[in-house]
Amino acid sequence: MLILRLVAAGVLVYAGLRLRKYLLRRNSSAPQAPATPGAKTAPVEDILMEDPICQRLVPKKQAITVRDTDGLHHFCSEDCRNIFLHQREKST
């Protein structure tokens, strides 16, 4: 009878540990709230612009820009800017 009680206690402990692990894993995948109540998220420092030549995303502050009749264009590198300008010269 003692062995049966020990086995039953072991099964209950095992089930409790598995349940605890499941609940912890489920809670950790949930989105986290700010650390302190009323805390705000950090402001966006820069936005990403798409290079019209290679379609890479480049931060607006770091982009190389060219203004023409179509507006302001943002490039990830001098090479992409030069390709763009060369294509514009060909089309005109």
Image (tube, helix red, strand yellow):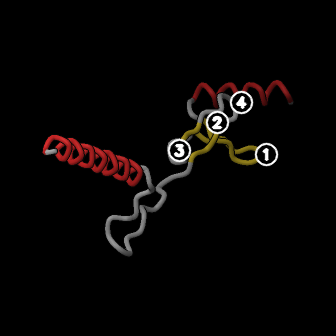
Question: Residue 1 placed where, x, y %?
Answer: 16, 44
**Separation (CA) of disc 2 from disc 1:** 15 Å
Disc number lying in front (2 or 1) = 2
Labels 4 and 2: the sequence-earlier one = 2
Q: At 47% from the left edge and 56% from the top edge, which residue is drawn? A: 45
Q: Is residue 64 above or below residue 23?
A: above
Q: Is residue 24 left or right of residue 51?
A: left
Residue 59 is marked as 3
Disc 3 residue type (three-letter): Pro
The residue that mark 1 highlights is 70
Q: Is residue 44 left or right of residue 89?
A: left
Q: At 65% from the left edge and 27% from the top edge, which residue is drawn? A: 82
Disc 2 residue type (three-letter): Asp
Q: Crowding near pointer 3: few (<14 within 10 Å), some, many (20+)?
A: some
**Separation (CA) of disc 3 from disc 1:** 20 Å
Disc 4 residue type (three-letter): Leu
Disc 1 residue type (three-letter): Asp
Cβ–Cβ under 8 Å for marks 2 and 1 = no
Labels 3 and 2: the sequence-earlier one = 2
**Separation (CA) of disc 4 from disc 2:** 13 Å
Residue closer to the observer: 60 or 47: 47
Residue 51 is marked as 2
**Separation (CA) of disc 4 from disc 3:** 21 Å
